[in-house]
Amino acid sequence: MCIALVSTLHPAYSLIVIDNRDEFLRRPTSSPDWWPEPSSFVLGSRDLARATHGTWMGVTKQGKVAVLTNYREDTAIEAIGQYSRGRIVNSWLTSPPREHQTTHDFVQSMVASPEAKQVGGFSLICGHINEPLAIVSNRSSDMDHITWVASERNQTRGLSNTSVDDRSWPKIIHGERLMQEAIEGHVQSQEDEEALLERFLAVLSTDTLPQLPGVKKTLDNYVNVLRESIFVPVIGSDETPDQNAEQEVAARGPLDQNYSSGPYGTQKQTILLARPDGRVRYFERTLYDDKVNAVPVGQGDRSFEFHVEP
């Protein structure tokens, strides 16, 4: 139950994106870094469980940005596609910089793409820093279903594992409010950038997951209350595989090794800060390694700074 929050509220930053990646904690994932050739202009972590090595969030030296959230389907079979969702993100971030593609053109071609119909349900926020961002999904049939965000100052918008127009999820409403409060508090206190990062990490670490007395803490049992909490503490264990995970193994087949079972929770927290002059700060905190060991605070942090190329 990932969450992405986008804001243009801070007077010193033209765009802020903060994101929690919730995942099965044994799923192998790289640390954020500049990608190898021929995509050395892309910065982000990568999912190593599928051959595509796609990502859920990244940015490029040319100022392209993308964030992906999955739909929460009714069954695991519906959630699994022939291709990795990360391929969709990669297709935006890794297109050759010299071939300038507008966000509108990419979204239009992606909505019409047969490939987009062959991955699990998703929503993708994409665009260029200092320009409006599009939210597109493979549930959209034409451009009339595209939502645009960050199109003007003082906007804050959340997205989780449901449609962009679904305002019934408490974590989305709560996240938007807490992000706004974090920005307003930072501005009023005239704090530095490190303090802003800490405020956003506190937002992303807000745990309001309901406890279900007498119910075993497995993903199967808790999946319907994950929408209540921005942060997801560890749920389940290797001894308590959930039913949906077993269906997913069968659904995926021999395409890739499967890591969709066992302990589940918030694994990574990512923050992107972009200034009007093109300066970008990209920060990511890893909370657990792929052996489900908690990473001591600070030891899993990676931070990058660069200016968007003209």
Image: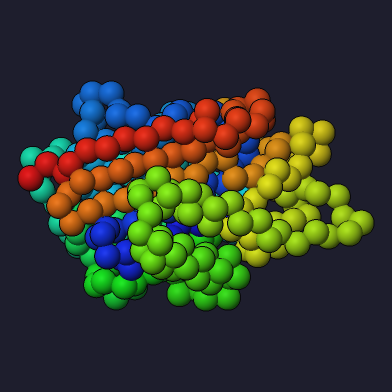
- Who's the residue at 39% across and 40% down the image? 283
246 sits left or right of 173 in the view: right
Location of the N terminus by quadrant is: bottom right
Q: Let me know if residue 255 appears in the view.
A: no
Residue 154, quarter of the rendered image: bottom left
Residue 141, quarter of the rendered image: bottom left
- Who's the residue at 51% across and 66% down the image? 178
308 sits left or right of 292 in the view: left
> Relative to residue 245, is residue 130 depicted above or below?
below
- Towards the viewer: 146 or 82: 146
- Who's the residue at 15% across and 52% down the image? 277
67 sits left or right of 82 in the view: left
Q: Position of residue 75 (x, y in %)?
A: 65, 55
By what rule are the colours in the image chosen?
rainbow
Q: Position of residue 196 (x, y in %)?
A: 41, 52
- Towards the viewer: 98 or 33: 33
- Towards the viewer: 254 or 51: 51
Q: Position of residue 233 (x, y in %)?
A: 68, 47
> Relative to residue 180, is residue 276 depicted above or below?
above
- Towards the viewer: 111 or 3: 3
Residue that protrudes farthest toward the right in the picture: 214
- Who's the residue at 52% across and 41% down the image? 268
Q: Position of residue 198 (x, y in %)?
A: 48, 48
Location of the C terminus by quadrant is: top left
> Relative to residue 58, is residue 71 depicted above or below?
below
